[in-house]
């Protein structure tokens, strides 16, 4: 690339979520001649594809915790699936527009936990999941790495350290070694846009953070410029026959991806009913009832956890109590639902519904979330002419309606014409009375 062409390009780089590794976020961007580095928190609304490049630490999207129980000590693993899926989409758009992403590898990879495959629970892992490309851990972190690309020499001399290495048997993969330890690749560039660099986490002093990212971004942008040389605008006027249909197809796909992302976000909001409590849970349940099941909700009751469900004529057809509970459903909440009905001026034959988000703090998985309701509580609900549902069951009804296995009218009938426990099990709706 000529100096005149290179000088025209100024990169806007995003450094994403460094507070998740204990680093303070600089209050101002770092701007030099060839690039500006912007720092954003993990929860930022800014999208990856708004930038020319993105820098991410390994492991931002997952958490591991050693749990000591009475019988054993084990490793607990959770990951932020919604955020991960969102950033996957944005990274695809970023790479599609000629940008790059850099993953800073600071720890061992943990790809299995308690027999479960967790090879795709972090963005760095996901972007390494190529056929016949393998990652392995060193027994301990190695502080000295050998740069194989001059541009990264200064950065790796100061901050390079390797906990893992790669073996590539995929001849069709564009895999370039950026750093080695004893002949084993520990840093790599894949498909000219996905950078993986072994690194320490810098200490939290502002001047160290500034040096760390300036050295890194200077190397990244220099290499990326060489690999993706700009050409004069007039060259683009020369067209291959397939360019027009390919661009049209790309436009259609981007539109489709945008629509899919929007739908996935809506579905994700529905699932929030499995974790929220208080006013947020009431809003989640109301959204599912109205948008998903077609039941109009009156939230004007003076008690924040009380709802009224309305028919097509606008008249109340059911009173509803919404509760966030750290354990299971108890007699207390069933009685409160009955009191809500009585307080609203209806007799004990009028439909009354208790929707409870159970086991909020105790659940660490879907299996633990899906706890049965005790038989004596089911029987008490039936005797009080109250129908009980977990938010897990409410989402089950919604899932059946959205898949076309149940109509909205059928779902509404289940909720308004029964007492006891409405349990959704796979594709079946069960009404249990506790007998």
Image (cartoon, rainbow, N blue to C red):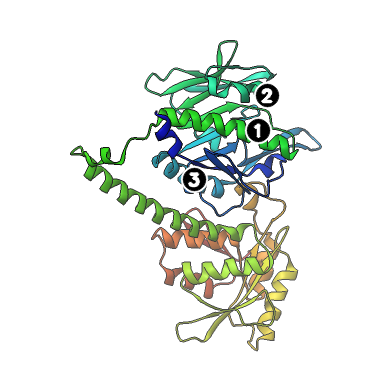
User: Of helix, strand and loop, which one carries label 3?
Assistant: loop
Give neighbour class at mark 2: few <14, some 14-19, many 20+ (Cα, 10 Å).
Answer: some
Label 1 – label 3 distance at C-alpha: 20 Å
Q: Nearer the viewer, residue 268 or 433?
A: 268
Percent position of residue 6, x then y: 43, 34
User: Of helix, strand and loop, which one carries label 2?
Assistant: helix
Q: Nearer the viewer, residue 385 or 68?
A: 68
The quarter in which the N terminus is drawn is: top left
Residue 104 falls in image quadrant: top right
Question: Residue placed at 67% from the left, 47% from the top?
Answer: 364
Q: Nearer the viewer, residue 360 or 173?
A: 173
Q: Residue furthest bottom?
A: 345
Question: Residue placed at 54% from the left, 34% from the top?
Answer: 102
| Sequence-earlier tag: 1 or 3 | 3
Verify CB contact (< 8 Å) between mark 1 and mark 2.
yes
Residue identifier under label 1: 212
User: Of helix, strand and loop, which one carries label 1?
Assistant: helix
The relative height of residue 54 versus residue 354 in the rendered view (above or below) is: above
Q: Nearer the viewer, residue 56 or 403?
A: 56
Residue 97 falls in image quadrant: top left
- The reply to whether residue 112 is in sight is no
Label 1 – label 2 distance at C-alpha: 9 Å
Question: Residue placed at 59% from the left, 31% from the top?
Answer: 216
> Viewed as shown, does residue 79 lie left or right of 65?
left
Mark number for residue 158? 2
Q: Residue furthest left?
A: 241
Residue identifier under label 3: 51
């Amino acid at each position: 690339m000529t100096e005149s062409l290179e000088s025209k390009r100024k990169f806007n780089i995003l450094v994403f979520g460094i507070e998740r590794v204990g680093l303070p976020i600089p209050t101002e961007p770092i701007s030099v001649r060839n690039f500006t580095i912007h720092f954003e928190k993990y929860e930022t609304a800014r999208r990856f594809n708004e930038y020319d490049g993105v820098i991410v630490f390994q492991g931002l999207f997952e958490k591991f915790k050693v749990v000591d129980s009475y019988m054993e000590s084990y490793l607990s693993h959770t990951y932020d699936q919604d955020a991960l899926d969102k950033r996957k989409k944005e990274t695809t758009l970023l790479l599609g527009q000629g940008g790059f992403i850099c993953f800073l590898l600071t720890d061992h990879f943990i790809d299995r936990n308690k027999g479960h495959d967790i090879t795709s629970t972090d963005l760095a892992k996901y972007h390494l999941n190529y056929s016949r490309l393998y990652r392995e851990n060193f027994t301990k972190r190695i502080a000295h790495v050998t740069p194989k690309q001059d541009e990264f020499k200064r950065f790796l001399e100061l901050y390079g350290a390797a906990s893992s290495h790669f073996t590539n048997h995929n001849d069709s993969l564009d895999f370039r070694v950026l750093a080695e330890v004893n002949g084993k690749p520990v840093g790599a560039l894949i498909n000219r846009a996905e950078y993986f660099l072994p690194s320490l986490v810098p200490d939290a002093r502002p001047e160290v953070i500034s040096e760390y990212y300036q050295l890194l971004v200077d190397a990244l942008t220099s290499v990326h410029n060489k690999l993706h040389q700009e050409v004069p605008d007039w060259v683009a006027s020369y067209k291959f026959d397939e360019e027009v249909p390919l661009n049209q197809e790309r436009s259609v796909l981007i539109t489709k991806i945008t629509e899919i992302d929007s739908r996935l976000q809506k579905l994700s909001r529905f699932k929030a009913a499995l974790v929220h409590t208080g006013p947020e849970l009431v809003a989640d349940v109301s959204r599912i009832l109205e948008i998903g099941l077609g039941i109009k909700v009156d939230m004007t009751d003076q008690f924040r956890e009380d709802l009224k469900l309305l028919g097509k004529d606008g008249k109340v057809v059911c009173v509803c109590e919404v509760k966030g509970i750290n354990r299971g459903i108890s007699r207390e909440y069933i009685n409160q639902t009955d009191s809500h009905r009585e307080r609203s001026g209806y007799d004990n034959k009028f439909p009354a519904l208790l929707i409870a988000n159970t086991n909020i703090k105790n659940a660490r998985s879907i299996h633990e979330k899906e706890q049965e309701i005790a038989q004596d509580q089911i029987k008490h609900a039936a005797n009080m002419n109250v129908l009980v549902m977990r938010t897990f069951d409410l989402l089950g009804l919604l899932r059946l309606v959205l898949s076309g296995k149940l109509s909205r009218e059928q779902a509404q009938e289940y909720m308004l014409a029964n007492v006891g426990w409405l349990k959704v099990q796979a594709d079946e709706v069960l009404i249990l009375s506790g007998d």
